Amino acid sequence: MSIAELPLTDTVPAGGLDAVRAWVDDIAALTQPDEVVWCDGSLGEADRLTKQLVAEGKLIRLNPEWRPNSFLARTDPGDVARVEDRTFICSEDESDAGPTNNWRAPDAMRAELREVFAGSMRGRTMYVVPFSMGPVGGPISQVGIQLTDSAYVAVSLGMMTRVTDIVLDLIDAGQPWVPTVHSVGFPLVDADGVAREDVPWPCNPTKYIVQFPETREVWSYGSGYGGNAILAKKCFALRIASVMARDEGWLAEHMLIIKVTSPEGRVFHFAAAFPSACGKTNLAMLEPSIPGWTVETIGDDIAWLRQGPDGRLRAINPEAGFFGVAPGTGLSTNRTAVQTLWGNTIFTNVALRDDGDVWWEGLTDEPPAHLVDWEGNDWTPESGRPAAHPNSRFTVSAAQCPSIADDWDAFDGVPIDAILFGGRRATNVPLVAQARDWKHGVFIGATVSSEKTAAAEGVVGELRRDPFAMLPFCGYNMADHWAHWLKVGEQLGDKAPAIFQVNWFRKGDDGRFLWPGFSENARVIEWIARRVEGSAGSVGTPIGRLPVVEELDLAGLDLPEEDVEALFEVDSASWQAECDLTEQFFDRFGSRVPAALRAELASLRYHLRA
Ligand code: GTP
Ligand code: SPV
Ligand code: MN
């Protein structure tokens, strides 16, 4: 059979291990790797792969005195973040992808992918990596397999998910699985058999991050960077899983999960959706500044939520590791993360110290006198540029986190008491507000806007709508996602969690953050917990219920009264302008916007004018 005739999978594969083997053979015939290696997720395997990556110059081993079994990867300068304009949702019907996704017809995209993947792994090894999202065999968990020609990606996947060959047994016993294919698009031998040298970070200027929601497949080409290449994460656990969730009545969301314990010993679980690089990992690892409260980590990026047998919404963290933003992570901001990174960590695009350890902006107050920056160049504090890339990251296993909760990998998940929506907003959005009810909460989620960060290619700081923090991650029409949330709320009835909006990033006229953030966010967490248990009051405003300021614990904070006022100011004129923008945003989705959300907008306008 010629390459052009080779079928690409276009149905969810059934038929157990035979189907897996046939698929692996098909992809190998298409991409033509030298060798196919099946991974089992063992420590020995990770050790072999990292040693090989070091030998090939693709990883730098850090000084084991400071950072045992840890590595630095430097990407190609053109492959440092998610590429949203090269991310495609290939549903049969364009309207199912919606106006916020790039859509391509599935057949046309398959033909294009067949071309780019043909021979793309020549001269390389193709790794077959079976993984479970969530506890292996758990009722909310799902399994998948990633094929990749990058050992860096295979090792990263082993840290971020549960890689084990038990997954193959589950598949053989009939469990559905999601096939994902990844190539860095840098074959070492061309079609004429001419060899070329490998480079430290192979990738391709042309990138494709492709989801087929109906057949539940992922194809990724040209990038080695996290969200583009670790396909179990954003591609599967959000874009594909959101579609599964819509069809099956659950939720796949860009949310952290925490366990909060009050001084009286009452336990709460919160889930919170903030856009990329807007504080999920930091809140997930919060070390409360107020006495008596503890916060423990369950997840820092993705939550799968499903109504449990008791009628409550239960959540799991489908991942098993953290792929966290390095800059801004330091002892004074996120001590828990710094402790998590003591060893067994892969750092990507941070700076290298002369003593063989790593550094990034915010790790310490003062930078070292000399560094090698993320691009491999000499750096001093006078260089006038950041030493670490603003989207530099760490990859580390969740089990290593000192604040990890004992129930973080509970089979059935944890019951969720409150859901938080947030963003990076210099103006308008108060420090915290509670939604009046589920519908109002869905309106708040649907209208989140946030200043763009370095987590994706594009202009940093630009304000954009990022509903549910899912703009780049919803595998179907965003307006249908809102309708789905309304439906889930109806199913949950009076067992539905309370919904809140938070904003750590409001600024004063002088441009400084009004709120100290980080561990002080515990004060907001406390208010939310008190609202959930019914022991704190609130003040009704058009945009939601705000704290009674006297009930908010601000003791010991050096916060001028006018800053507190500014943090909670609801300016009618700016909110009316915000409503106009919301209407324009809704209009992009036409008649698919649920009537309940149009009604929320009308009611907000009415109350702002009243
Ligand atoms: P992704 O992994 O991209 O999804 O990001 P994330 O939402 O987990 O964001 P993360 O917690 O890594 O924070 C991103 C940046 O925001 C870091 O530089 C943090 O230091 C900063 N940040 C987090 N929390 C706060 C806060 O409360 N206040 C301020 N001012 N900055 C914060
Ligand atoms: C994000 O951008 O939201 C991340 C990093 O969590 S990535 O895995 O690249 O998506
Ligand atoms: Mn994220």
Image (cartoon, rainbow, N blue to C red):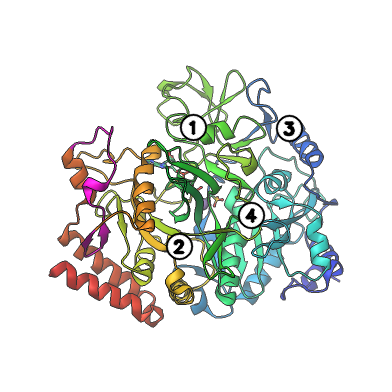
Relative placement, left or right, of 6 versus 247 is right
Query: Tag 2 or tag 3, which sits nearer the N-term?
Result: 3
Q: Find disc 4 in the rendering and name its residue.
A: 410
The kind of residue tagged 3 is Val
Q: Nearer the viewer, residue 117 or 309?
A: 309
Residue 121 left/right relative to 586: right
The CA span between labels 4 and 3 is 36 Å
Residue 358 belongs to magenta span: no
Which of pointers 4 and 1 lies earlier in the amino acid sequence?
1
Which residue is tagged 1?
335
Which residue matches tag 2?
471
Residue 206 visible from this viewpoint: no
Find out whether the residues at labels 3 and 2 contact each other: C-beta distance under 8 Å: no
The amino acid beneath tag 4 is: Ala
Nearest-to-viewer mark from 4 and 3: 4
Compared to 299, does 393 lie above or below? Answer: above
Amino acid type for the residue under numbered disc 1: Arg
Q: Nearer the viewer, mark 4 or mark 1?
A: 4
User: Which residues are the magenta region?
Assistant: 539-560
Q: Residue at x 79, y 45 (%)?
A: 195
**Horizontal and vertical percent position of residue 78:** 55, 45
Q: Earlier in the sequence, mark 2 or mark 1?
A: 1
Marked residue nearer the N-terminal end (3 or 1): 3
| Residue at mark 2 to residue at mark 4: CA–CA distance | 29 Å
In space, the residues marked 2 and 1 are separated at their CA atoms by 30 Å
Please, what secondary structure does the residue beneath circle 1 have? helix
Mark 4: give few (<14), some (14-19) or many (20+) Cα within 10 Å.
some
Distance Cα–Cα, label 3 vs label 2: 37 Å
For disc 3, the marked residue is: 54
Q: Tell me whether circle 3 and circle 1 mark residues in contact (CB < 8 Å).
A: no
* Left or right: where 67 falls relative to 512: right
Name the spot of residue 437 as percent of width and height, x first.
34, 69
